[in-house]
Amino acid sequence: MPRKLIKRYLPDPRTIKGNRYLSFLGHRIHDPNLWHLNRRSAAAAFLVGIFCAFLPIPFQMVLAATLAVVIRCNLPLSVALVWITNPVTMPGIFYFTYKVGCYLLDTPIRNIPFEMTPQWLEAELGAIWEPLLAGSILTGAVMGSFCYFMIRFYWRWSVGRSWRARQLRRSREPDTKE
């Protein structure tokens, strides 16, 4: 069942509830609906987490947690999915979203040598932020929506398969009522 698979990889709720960066959410973080895992909450958590993962901003997890509280979807799953963009995957993902943004805004793709210095960020990020942000928002919305529908479909398919297997087992069992 999808619930068992997802729960295996989720962070512990106590860790998230105790996070000092989420203290601004106050008592809302203790809402039990944020910790339930069902088809609706998991699919919405994928939408929120994937969308936030594609945004080129710091503190993506805080934004994902805030959106999860507002939408009332599974909070740990939303926060965990943000780590799709990690230091290893981030350059490739953001370069792709930059190219999508350049295509959207009909601007030429700049060949910029990458350096992780404050001077580089100040000089070059000012030139590429519009296509990067536009591409990130569009790509995040498309990928998040795609994952939302795929999780809902997979969950329904998995539950239906479990029901059919259970019915088949029951039909093969000998009738002991006679």
Image: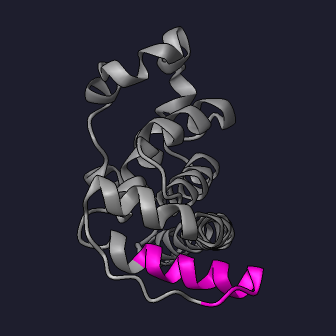
Q: How is the image coloured?
A: one colour
* Residue sitting at the far right: 105
The x, y position of residue 76, in whole percent, is 40, 40
Q: Quadrant of residue 23?
A: top left
Q: Is residue 172 at all visible to an observer of this figure?
A: no
Q: Nearer the viewer, residue 88 or 6?
A: 88
Near-viewer residue (176 or 9): 9
What secondary structure is the stretch in magenta mostly built from?
A: helix
Horizontal side of 105 relative to 89 (left or right) equals: right
Foreground residue among 29 and 94 = 94
At x 26%, y 70%, the residue is 115
User: Does the magenta portion include 83?
Assistant: no
List the single residue furthest toward the top.
27
Check the image and report above or below for 50 versus 171. Answer: above
Residue name at image x 30 percent, y 53 percent: 118
Measured as percent of width and height from the top left, residue 87 is found at: 25, 64
- In this view, 33 is above or below 121: above
Above/below status of 174 relative to 108: above
User: Position of 151 compared to 61: left or right?
Assistant: right
Q: Position of residue 144 (x, y in %)?
A: 61, 65
Q: Which residues are magenta?
A: 93-108
Splitting the image into 4 quarters, where does residue 84 fall?
bottom left
